[in-house]
Image (cartoon, helix red, strand yellow):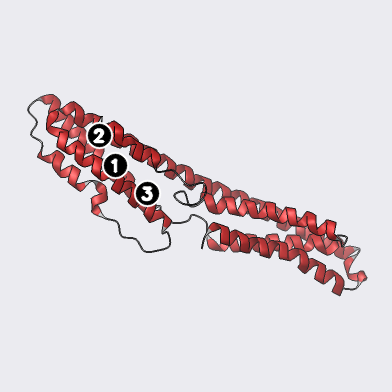
Amino acid sequence: MSPLLISLLAFTCIFGGTFLGLFIRYRLPDRHLSGDTRDIVRQGTGVIATLASLVLGLLIASANGKFETESSQVKQLIANIVLLDNVLKLYGSDTDGLRALMRSEIPVMAGRIWRESSSSGKEQTFEAADLGVAVYNEVLKLAPKTDAQHFLQSKAIDTITDIGKTRLLLFTNTGGSIPVPFLFVLIGWLTLIFASISLFAESGAKAVAVLFVFSLAATAAIFLILELSQPFAGLMRISDQPLRDALPAIIS
């Protein structure tokens, strides 16, 4: 289910709490909505509002952490690819074909990374080719003639290994980082809060309009959390352009 659809459902529940409160207000006698009852409801609402704010902060921190982590992993992947190309370039003309192979492998890798994430929730199988097996085998076939070439071959193997590890981390991180029960509980708390506010608010279009704006604000926070938890899809996705832009450097 997309973040937008979940957010719309959340908004329906949260803003629906406003009408739930108004419905209860019209059904209960006035003696049940004054004095000690009003104080108890307000104190309980304050407790729930505090818990909701804590959960919101926790979810935002978790989603933002996932976004930053996977963004850093993509940057590390790009850096290692450029480093590998530079190492092979220093090795000599024997690696020209290998560098051309890298040029063809990088867009395939980029497409698979973003495709895996956009299909989160579906069972995925990691393909060994993503570890650069073809490139790795070609590096092993090199026949170094000098100590410098021996060193560069070893460095290339280490860099390919790092690329494979980063790629595997990106694969294992596929999927949302937001626990669904947390999200349901949060929406329930927000619905209860808005129902409590409207229960004692003065009836009228002005009060409903104000609560409508507040509902949008609360839903926007939930939408932000859901978007950040899917770094490779949605409006705030990590761009694959930097990885593809590494290609000119490889063939230059």
- Residue at image mark 1: 163
In the image, residue 177 sits, relative to residue 245, either above or below, namely: below
Mark 1 lies on a secondary structure that is helix
Q: Nearer the viewer, residue 98 or 177?
A: 98
In the image, residue 18 sits, relative to residue 248, either above or below, namely: below
Q: Residues within 10 Å of mark 3 (few under 14, many from 20)?
A: many
Task: Say if mark 2 contacts mark 1, CB within 8 Å.
Answer: yes
> Residue 19 in the image: x percent, y percent?
77, 67
Look at 84% across and 60% down and name the residue there.
205
**Lower sequence index among marks 3 and 1:** 1
Mark 2 lies on a secondary structure that is helix
- Is 137 left or right of 245, judged from the image as shown? left
| Location of residue 18 by image quarter | bottom right
- Residue at image mark 2: 84
Q: Give the amino acid type for the residue marked by disc 1 in the picture.
A: Ile
Mark 3 lies on a secondary structure that is helix
Q: Nearer the viewer, residue 37 or 236?
A: 236
> Residue 170: which numbered mark, if any?
3
**Mark 3 and mark 1: span between their CA atoms?**
11 Å
Is residue 182 visible in the rendered image? The answer is no
Look at 23% across and 51% down and name the residue there.
129
In the image, residue 11 sits, relative to residue 32, either above or below, namely: above
Look at 13% across and 29% down and name the residue there.
93
**Lower sequence index among marks 2 and 1:** 2
Q: Nearer the viewer, residue 213 or 52?
A: 213
Look at 34% across and 50% down and name the residue there.
111
Q: Give the amino acid type for the residue marked by disc 2 in the picture.
A: Leu
- Is 180 left or right of 189, judged from the image as shown? left
